[in-house]
Amino acid sequence: MADSFKHHFLIAMPALTDSFFYRSVVYLCEHDADGAMGLIINRPTKIMLTELLSHLEVDNDSEAKMNTPVLFGGPVQKEQGMVLHGGPAQWPNTMEIHQGVYLTTSSEILPTLGTDTGPEHFLVTLGYAGWGAGQIEQELADNTWLTVSATTEILFETPADQRWHTAANLLGINIDLISANAGRA
């Protein structure tokens, strides 16, 4: 197995029926000996970005935000907002995950979303997914997830409802043909 699955997608196997992770694609932002942290990138909520910004009293007149759903990033700290985005990395509390892919937890980025001063591509999530030391490795050994290197095309250009199939296609797999019954030969 890889030393780190940072900047990889975890693609839920059909047998994973957990309500949080069924047919999910998780973008891993961190993975080391202490555990892993990622964002579910294919679960739009009913909350639109314009509603979230209004609730937070953030001024942003961008048209782009009107039709942008906020994503359910995971079951941990569901009130914690995070912005996964392309460059630049000019806001506080921004970390580079991979070349040109950043994670910002500062609300200072919010007024710039969809404007000329903000990142061209972005996903806004509430909550995140977290795993303890060795937990991801065990789940991979149990055939819970497929893994593949992440692409910015899937992150930022593929519609959320197509990300599960598209991510599996990176492996040359039609995930609809995989049995939901897991086992070992």
Image (tube, rainbow, N blue to C red):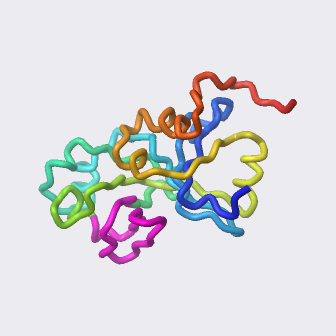
- Which residue is at the front of the view, 53 or 155? 155
Q: How many marks?
A: 0
Identified at 55% across, 49% down, the residue is 9
Identified at 19% across, 45% down, the residue is 66
- Which residue is at the front of the view, 78 or 182? 182
Q: Quadrant of the N terminus?
A: bottom right
Residue farthest to the front?
172
Identified at 50% across, 36% down, the residue is 164
Query: Is residue 102 a member of the stretch shown in magenta?
Result: yes
Q: Quadrant of the C terminus?
A: top right
- Which residue is at the front of the view, 80 or 136? 136
Residue 84: % across, % down: 39, 59
Query: Is residue 126 a member of the stretch shown in magenta?
Result: no
To which quarter of the image does residue 103 belong?
bottom left
Residue 149: % across, % down: 55, 52
Identified at 40% across, 61% down, the residue is 82
For residue 167, above or below residue 50: above
Residue 135: % across, % down: 73, 55
For residue 169, above or below residue 91: above
To which quarter of the image does residue 85 belong?
bottom left
Numbered range of the magenta stretch: 83-109
